[in-house]
Amino acid sequence: MYDVQCTMQVDVWYLDVPSHLFATTSHTFQLSDSLVGFINHDQNISCRFLDKYFVSTEMPVKLTAEIHDLSGFFTGRFGIPSANLTYKWIINGSPQEENSKVIEPTFSEPQLNNISVIVTATKTNGSRLIQKSGTFNITLNSKQPITNLTVDGPTEVKVFERLQLDFKIHRGTPPFLYRYSSWMNQTNTNSEYAEKHGINESSFSIIKNFSEKGTIRLYIGLKNDVSAYPMMMNIKVH
């Protein structure tokens, strides 16, 4: 297998009477003797916030080996017969049994997962036997989702009295992000909004006091890279 860097010049002509050269451009590209492609990954997570290479430990990940083959010579598009394609998957150094374009493993522990697939295409073109291989790689970071958020603290306070709410995050791999907002229920107007990033502990506190009597609605939105957990509370101020 070898790779060659090539430069292609393209001339753009205006075809009329008389015709003339309109523009000239060049493009440098890599000509490879091996198959070129990538591993696509998909997981049914509605909330992924910081990086597309995070996956949850709670469900399978769909991995698909995709070949860059615009002509369809190997993949068999446009009426061209497909090559015989084989797939050898290797996950964290361990060969997998599946010989398939698509596999669905579950990464049950929080860790970096190194994934490779060796794709081999074999095809007869007239009397000529053509065989090419390529290795595609991806690294996915598996993390545990948040399963619960509990709070310890009073839900009734006096005006200007210090209120401390202590929150505990159940499971979930850090870092966490939380944001909260509070408003007076009677007027439905926002009185405060704040957020904090990069929490590496499984607990945090919110300390507040209120200058008006009434019922305060307190919303807490907690996230990590693979999950979101909302909580709504009522605080009575008298």
Image: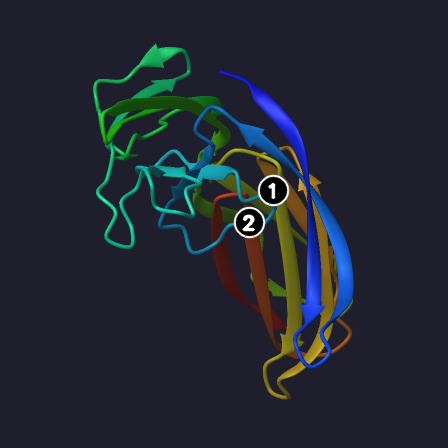
Q: Which mark identifies residue 39?
A: none
Residue at image coords 71%, 50%? 196
Badge 1 or badge 2: first in the primary sequence: 1
Left/right placement of residue 116 relative to residue 156 reads left
* Numbered tag placed on residue 176 in the rendering: 1
The residue under label 1 is which amino acid type? Phe
Q: Which amino acid does label 2 sit on?
A: Lys
Task: Identify whether 185 is placed above or below 210.
Answer: below
Q: Which of 192 and 77 is in front in this view?
A: 77
Q: Which residue position holds label 2?
A: 223
Q: Is residue 172 left or right of residue 185?
A: left
Please report the residue visible at 72 percent of the width from the left and 66 percent of the height from the top.
193
Tell me the quadrant of the picture where the C terminus can be found. bottom right
Residue 43: quarter of image: top left
Q: Pinpoint residue 86: horizontal percent, then vertical percent.
A: 25, 25
Q: In this view, does 4 lie to the left or right of 150?
A: right
Q: Which of 8 and 114 is in front in this view?
A: 8
| Contact, mark 1 vs mark 2 (Cβ under 8 Å) | yes
The front one of 138 and 12 is 12
The residue shown at (63%, 52%) is 178
User: What's the residue at 55%, 44% (across, down)?
Assistant: 224
Report the side of 133 relative to 195 (left or right). left
What is the residue that sits farthest to the front in this orientation? Answer: 18
Image location of residue 19, percent across then percent down? 71, 74
Residue 117 makes an appearance in the image:
no
Please identify the residue farthest to the bottom as the structure is shown. Answer: 187
Q: How crowded is mark 2: few (under 14 residues within 10 Å), some or many (20 or more)?
A: many
